[in-house]
Amino acid sequence: MAIYQSVAATATVHGDSAANSSSVRRRRGGAPLENVELDAFEGESSSEELVRDSSSDDNNNGNGVDDDESKGKREQNAADVSAVNFDYRPSFPAHRRIRESPLSSGNIFKQQSHAGLFNLCIVVLIAVNSRLIIENLMKYGWLIKTDFWFSSTSLSDWPLFMCCLTLLLFPVASFIVEKLAQHKYIPEPVVVILHIIITSTSILYPIFVILRSDSAFLSGVTLMLFSCIVWLKLVSYAHTSYDLRALAKSNEKVEGLPSTLSMDYPYDVSIRRLAYFMVAPTLCYQPSYPRTPYIRKGWVFRQLVKLIIFTGLMGFIIEQYINPIVQNSQHPLKGNLLYAIERVLKLSVPNLYVWLCMFYCFFHLWLNILAELLRFGDREFYKDWWNAKTVDEYWRLWNMPVHKWMIRHLYFPLIRHGVPKSVALLIAFLVSALFHELCIAVPCHIFKLWAFIGIMMQVPLVLITNYLQNKFRSSMVGNMIFWFIFCILGQPMCVLLYYHDLMSRKGKTE
C-alpha cells in the first residue's frame, strides 16, 4: 500500500514519464520472443531515465542546495515509482534468461554465497554435540584426571629431556663443518660425509634414548617430532649450502633467483642465520627471509588465548570420549567384523574433532605465533586442503613446510638426476611413511608398521582419486573419498590398532 500511495502522490510530477513507459510497455507486448532479452535491457534503460527525470525535477523545485540524504531519498522514491509503473506490470516477462538453481551441481561451486548454510551447520553441530556432552557427563561423570596437564611420572623422563637439550649440539656441528668448508680446510667429499654423519646421528640418538627408557608416550612423541624437525632442517641447511658453494664456484648468473640468492650475494656462513633458521617456522634454509616491520603484541596475546582454549578442548575430547571408546573395544583385526566397524565409526567423530583441533592449534595458531614473534613474513603454512579433489592434492596443500622441503630437497633433485616422476613420488611417500612410523612406533615400543602401511596406502588412493576425478569431472567425488577414507576410516583404525598392540605389550611385560 505504501508503494501505491507513493505512486499516486507523484503521478502529476511523473506523468510524462509514466506515459512514455506505458507506451514502451504496449510496444513490448507485441515483440517476438527472441527480442525479450533486448527488451529487458531497454526496460532497464527506461528505468534509469525515470530516475534521472525525477531527480532533475526535484532539483529544479528546490533552492539548489541538495545534501546527500535528501538526494538519496528522492532517488529511492523515483526508483520505486519506476519499478511499480514499469517492471511490475502484468505484461512484463518474469522469466527472461536461463538460470540454474543455487544448489545445482554446476552452480554450487561458483560465486554463490552459502554462509547461511554454513551457519546452520555450525548451530546444528553445537546443539548435537552439546547434547552428547551432557549425556556423556550424566552417564560416565567427569573422566578427566587431575594430572592431565602435569604428571609426576613425566618428571622421571629426564633422559628424554636431556636428549632434547643435547639436540642443539647438532646444528653447532653442522655450522663448524660449513665454516671449515667455506675456508676450504676440508675437501667437498669430506663435507658431505660429515653432514651425513651429523644428520643420521640427530635422528638415531633420540630413537636409542627412547627405546632404552620406559618413558611416557607423550614425552616420546614430543622428542621424536623435535628430532625429526631438527633432521629436516639440518638436511636443508647442508643441501642449500652445498648448492650455494657450487654456484659460487661456477659464478653462474641464474635468472629468476631472488636477490638474497643471487651470486651478487656473497656466500657467507653465519651462526646468526643458522640460529634464526633453527627456530623459524620453516624447514627450508636460505640466507634471509621476508620480514614483517614489527610485532603485534595484542594479536599474539589473542592467539595464545585461542591456543590454550583449543588445546584444552582437544584434551577434553581425548579423555572424555576417545579413551572410553578405545578401552571398551576389541582388536579390530581379531574380533567380530561388525563390532569392529561399529567401534571405528563411533571413534571417527571425536577423532576427527581432535585432528581438526590439532591442525588449527599447530599449523594456524602456533606457527603464526612463532612467525609473529620472529617477524617471519611468509606464513603460508597450509592451503585450502579441505577442498582437495584428490589425495595427491591434499598432500600438496595441508602441510606446506614439509611439502616445500620435499619438492626442494627430494622430489626435484631426484628428477634432475634422471629418476622418473612416478618413482620420485613413490620415494617421497616412502620417506613420509618412514617418519610417520618412527614418530608413533618408537614411543610405543611397537614396530607393527601400521602407520607405514597407512601412508603407503595413499599411493593407490592417489591413482584411484585421480582416475575418478578425470572420469566424472566432479570435484565432489574425490573430496568425499578423501574425507571418508582418510578421516573416517583410516585414522580411527590406526588408533585402535596401536592401542591394543600397546596394551598387549604392557600385559606381556607385566
Image (spheres, grey):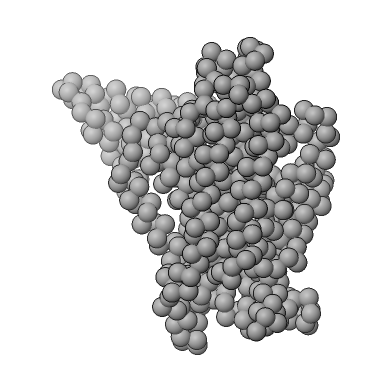
Q: Residue furthest left?
A: 63
Determine if residue 15 is in view.
no
Percent across and percent down for residue 289 are 48, 30
The structure residue drawn at horizontal position 79% and vertical position 80%, both measured from the top left corner, is 334
Quadrant of the rendered structure where residue 294 is? top left
The structure residue drawn at horizontal position 52% and vertical position 17%, both measured from the top left corner, is 266
Quadrant of the rendered structure where residue 13 is? top left
Quadrant of the rendered structure where residue 85 is? top left
The structure residue drawn at horizontal position 29% and vertical position 22%, both measured from the top left corner, is 56
The structure residue drawn at horizontal position 52% and vertical position 45%, both measured from the top left corner, is 169
Percent across and percent down for residue 483 are 67, 58
In the image, is 107 to the left or to the right of 270? right
Q: Please, is residue 141 above or below residue 107 in the view?
A: below
Q: Please, is residue 421 above or below residue 66 in the view?
A: below
Q: Residue furthest front?
A: 185
| Near-viewer residue (443 or 200) | 200
Quick one: quadrant of the C terminus?
bottom right
Percent across and percent down for residue 207 are 64, 58
